[in-house]
């Protein structure tokens, strides 16, 4: 990285080669019948989804940079203390666990701060905004030894479980390649030049948080922040952790070993509307690398029959030696369908989830591991973020996950390392 030596970077992120991410039951002695005291950083949209799923616990603290949204949440949870600055929420005594449901660019600073104060953490996906932050969060989680979970709630559904069982029992033979696509459209915008007044009740400087300051504009928030590299990562950062979760789980994948991407012109401000990323992974079963291709913005695999492509606007396709498995969040089919008319499915062997949020609550109370803890979801996030880095560099990246760098180019360094404005740090 231009301003940091490798040694300094490794020291700052707490990374050491051979680090082991583990989960311990030490410190988990709460009765399963006791309620957790939970603080929420973020109160609307996805945060509200988690609030609704965790309202059977004690919601004791709420934080939002929008006074109007904070007031609505406070009305529903009148016993909770309220804050605009999440750092003040973290300072509140008596909080057992914290939910981080902010835009991507503040995930890491909030998550690491919560972990370092001994709280269990649930964080929305992607786990972080940059690759260096992702590793720092994993290291902090390993040191904290608390219950962690990323917000990939589709993982808890029955559909993904049945697909994983099909893949792992060889229903379509050895998997040769995987194709993953999402139809969402982000990016393709021009940075606004006008500087309208900040709306009353909006604490914009706190919303900007750790990243370089830029004047307020409604094109940045709420939600539309995903259209900008400064705050999010477009379609891949939004949906990659959901759809790529399935092949990572089914095939036991770790971080990619290579990535290259194509798409429309590279804009320093916005992610591309459409993009194709070609990943390579070390095959857990040995042999040639396993290929996974990501598509976004309406792009799909060329091999997909037109009638199927029309019905499956987003999906995951496992290409095996004996056939294919096509899945989305809620359904899946075996292809060609006529070949599998009499196919006998394996008996289910992956237990039914008690619910994604409930898994985290149980883990907080008992120490039982979650299915999407930060060790697992950190690697998943790393893959998604690496695809964006490959696109922004315009080069094929040979990826060394342990060293957290592209070994064949230094052009990627600028997109790997987080850079915070004065007053903010991990």
Image (cartoon, helix red, strand yellow):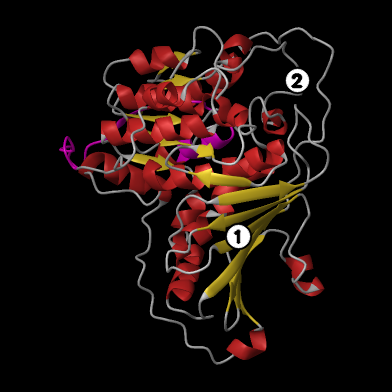
Regarding residue 153, the answer to whether it shows in the image is yes
Label number found at residue 262: none
Graded by Cα atoms within 10 Å as few (under 14), some (14 to 19) or many (20 or more), the crowding at tag 2 reads some
Q: Position of residue 314 (x, y in %)?
A: 68, 58
Between 84 and 167, the one lying in front of the other is 167
Graded by Cα atoms within 10 Å as few (under 14), some (14 to 19) or many (20 or more), the crowding at tag 1 reads many
What residue is at 71 percent from the left and 11 percent from the top? 199
Helix, strand or loop at mark 2: loop
Say if the magenta span includes residue 230: no
Please state, as top left, top right, bottom left or bottom right, where the N terminus lies in the image: top right
What residue is at 63 percent from the left and 45 percent from the top? 387
Helix, strand or loop at mark 1: strand
Give the distance between the C-alpha atoms of the residues marked 1 and 2, in whole angstroms. 36 Å
Q: Residue furthest front?
A: 408
Q: Which range of residues does the magenta coloring cover?
A: 25-52
Residue at mark 2: 218
Report the side of 152 relative to 19 (left or right). Answer: right
Q: Position of residue 386 (x, y in %)?
A: 58, 42
Q: Place residue 408 in its image quadrant.
A: top right
Residue at mark 1: 292
Which one is earlier in the sequence, the residue at label 1 or at label 2? Answer: 2
Please state, as top left, top right, bottom left or bottom right, where the C terminus lies in the image: top left
What residue is at 41 percent from the left and 36 percent from the top? 122
Between 386 and 41, the one lying in front of the other is 386
Q: Is residue 205 above or below residue 297?
A: above
């Amino acid at each position: 990285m231009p301003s940091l030596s490798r040694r300094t970077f490794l020291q700052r992120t707490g990374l050491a080669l051979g680090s082991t991410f583990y989960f311990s039951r030490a410190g988990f002695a709460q009765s399963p019948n006791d309620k957790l005291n939970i603080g929420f950083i973020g109160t609307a949209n996805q945060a509200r989804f988690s609030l609704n799923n965790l309202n059977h616990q004690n919601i004791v603290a709420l934080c939002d940079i929008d006074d109007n949204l904070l007031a609505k949440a406070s009305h529903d949870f009148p016993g909770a203390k309220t804050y605009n600055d999440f750092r003040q929420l973290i300072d509140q005594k008596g909080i057992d666990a914290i939910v981080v449901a902010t835009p991507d660019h503040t995930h890491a600073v909030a998550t690491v701060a919560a972990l370092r104060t001994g709280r269990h953490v649930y964080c929305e996906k992607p786990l972080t905004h940059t690759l260096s932050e992702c590793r720092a969060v994993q290291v902090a989680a390993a040191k904290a030894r608390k219950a962690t979970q990323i917000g990939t709630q589709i993982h808890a559904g029955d559909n993904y479980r049945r697909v994983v069982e099909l893949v792992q029992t060889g229903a379509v033979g050895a998997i040769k390649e995987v194709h993953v696509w999402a139809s969402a459209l982000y990016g393709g915008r021009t940075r606004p030049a006008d500087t309208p007044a900040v709306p009353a009740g909006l604490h914009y400087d706190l919303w900007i948080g750790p990243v370089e300051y830029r004047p307020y504009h409604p094109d940045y928030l709420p939600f539309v922040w995903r259209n900008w590299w400064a705050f999010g990562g477009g379609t891949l950062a939004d949906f990659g952790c959901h759809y790529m979760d399935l092949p990572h789980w089914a095939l036991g994948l770790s971080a990619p070993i290579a990535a290259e991407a194509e798409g429309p012109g590279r804009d320093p401000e916005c992610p591309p509307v459409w993009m194709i990323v070609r990943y390579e992974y070390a095959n857990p079963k040995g042999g040639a690398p396993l290929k996974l291709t990501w598509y976004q913005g309406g792009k799909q695999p060329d091999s997909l029959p037109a009638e199927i492509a029309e019905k499956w606007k987003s999906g995951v396709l496992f290409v095996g030696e004996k056939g294919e498995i096509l899945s989305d969040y809620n359904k899946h089919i075996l292809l060609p369908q006529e070949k599998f008319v009499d196919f006998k499915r394996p008996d289910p062997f992956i237990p039914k989830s008690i619910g994604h949020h409930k898994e985290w609550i149980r883990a907080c109370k008992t120490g039982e591991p979650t299915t999407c803890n930060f060790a697992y979801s950190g690697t998943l996030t790393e893959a998604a973020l690496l695809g964006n880095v490959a696109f922004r560099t315009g080069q094929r990246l040979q990826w060394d996950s342990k060293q957290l760098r592209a070994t064949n180019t230094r052009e990627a360094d600028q997109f790997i390392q987080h850079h915070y404005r004065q007053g903010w740090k991990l």
